[in-house]
Amino acid sequence: MPDEKQHQSGANECQARVCRHADPQVRDCHAGVCRGRIVPLFFSIGRAISQENDLPGAMDALLDYMSRIMGMKLAMINLHHRESGKIFIHKSIGLTEEEQSRGVYFPGEGITGRVVENARPVVVLRIGDEPALLNRTGILSRGADREDAFICIPILRGRKVLGTISAARHYENQDMLNKHVDALVVVADLLVQGVELFLIENADRMSRGQERGDAQGEASKRYRPANLIGTSRAMMDVFSMLYKVARTRTTVLLLGESGVGKELIAEAIHRDGMNPGGPMIRFNCAALPESILESELFGHEKGAFTGAEQTRKGRFEEADGGTIFLDEVGELSLSVQAKLLRVLQERSFERVGGNKTVTVNIRVVAATNRDLAGMVEKGMFRQDLYFRLNVFPILIPPLRDRGSDIITLAEHFVTRFAKAGGKQINRITTPVINMLMNYSWPGNVRELENVIERAVILTEDDAIHAYHLPLALQTPVFAAKNIPNGMEARLAAIEYEMLVEALRLHHGNGSKAAMELGLTRRTMGLRMAKYKLDYRDFRRGDSLPPTAAGGQRS
């Protein structure tokens, strides 16, 4: 104990001495840059690992230091289970258990996977500019988080990566960021021995525990491939439902507005169903006239009608051994509904003009944007068919209810269309984010995809700007100023964006922003007042500016 008291006393003296003589810009001990603060941490970690074999205690001490002293709002210690290849969050601050369970990566995936693969630290100065950040936990999706830096440090034994230390916070001082990175590199070296021993002793138990823990988070990992993007609560609920039904033969009814992605959901159900290697047949029930609809679905025999020169299989036969997706099922006529009911009940039918029963082994996924229960009451849809289809209904949320998924999807579409068009687009500007978040999206994901494709085509630099968006998205931002549509609205959008970008760049310093734009300080103030911009909203980059209309982001 005397050694410990002597060490603590020396640390306090060191702390006082360093704080007195530090550079004023980086002297704040609460920023985590004073030696007197970090030496006791090194001592605690070293003692916990070498003397007490207490890796959890060492990790808790580190996370507490990162939170209280370094000011990290998010910090994670990831371990790399080499047998399965999984990189998972072992301990964290700023994450719920559910969010932590979603943070599973493989080498090469995202920033964490890249650090494990290359055995080198990665520092992202601004999260919003980094397309490789997968954000599977969903915690870094808010607008304010896009201004934060993200640090990921490998825990190395030679060239073997045992895990990583990662964290996120906003930095205004590059020296402070560098000092935090250096400190975490040293801490990672201290943890190596304990982490390696822990992985060896607990490999089997971790593998079993991870499998059990994955049961809750499996939906998010299994049902979030490239064609299913989302971390919002609404979509996580959908993923949970899909996980429960995918491995059954149950008929699924997908409900929701047009454009929400029902076909992609159906593909996910098929891919993780009982027959993923079988065919996936898509059929739009509203695409064909009733006269040929029955033949398309059930097939026909040779000579069944004029033009039937040979026997032809229908979509149900083509789907045998796999899945058939019936989109817009509410558009079927009552006569076709009767035959569909038999397929759902018995998995058998006769081709048009034939009397031979055809039996199929299929999974039926139906979708509609209509109110089938209301149609049943009006006699427009068979009640018995409705009950057969409605065994396992899943309501897909509209895009306006998915919060930050709007920006995640927008970034995905920007990357895709920019690559297809041979363009280098690195960011979506702040005014565009405001407009995307405030729009109601009646066309849902399909409309967002079209809007981003148009914007990518129009842009001539490395960013998506407000004036690249359709006027339908721009108008709400300026509605409070009674600016008419047309050229005035377009000019206002350009002016607003330039003001916002200059203020964001200079963290709300009006004089520097005015200089950036070539305006006087007085003119800058008048322009800011015109759009109800407040310099305080740009200080420290803590939040996105409000819209010019003063509306709230959803």
Image: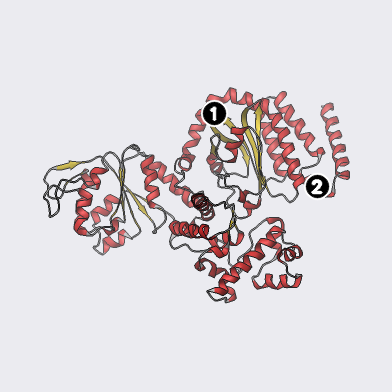
- The number of discs equals 2
Q: Nearer the viewer, residue 357 or 375?
A: 357
* Residue 344, visible in the rendered structure: no
Percent coordinates x, y for residue 407 in the rendering = 54, 54
| Observer-nearest of 124 and 36 | 124
Q: Position of residue 423 (x, y in %)?
A: 54, 52
Q: Position of residue 217 (x, y in %)?
A: 49, 40
Q: CA distance from mark 1 to mark 2?
A: 41 Å
Q: Mark 1 packing: few (<14 Cα in 10 Å), some, or many (20+)? A: some
Give 245 or 430, whichever is nearer the viewer.
430
| Residue at (76% x, 43% y) in the render | 32
Q: Is residue 31 left or right of residue 325?
A: right
Which amino acid does the dot numbered 1 rest on? Met
Mark seen at residue 26:
2
Q: Which mark is drawn over residue 274? A: none
SS at mark 2 in the image: helix
Q: Is residue 345 above or below residue 259?
A: above
Image position of 47 with respect to 333: above or below: above
The residue where tag 1 is placed is: 206
Left or right placement of residue 446 versus residue 24 in this view:
left
Residue 300, compared with residue 468, is above or below; it is above
SS for dot 1: helix
- Please name the residue shown 22% across and 55% down the image: 293
Residue 201 can be seen in this image: yes
Placement of the N terminus among the 4 image quadrants:
top right
Q: Which numbered disc flags the more N-terminal residue, 1 or 2?
A: 2
What amino acid is found at the position of numbered circle 2 in the picture?
Answer: Val
Res. 523 image quadrant: bottom right
| For the residues bearing labels 1 and 2, Cβ distance under 8 angstroms | no
Q: With 27 as the anchor, is 225 left or right in this view? A: left
164 relative to 109 in the view: left or right: right
Q: Nearer the viewer, mark 1 or mark 2?
A: 2
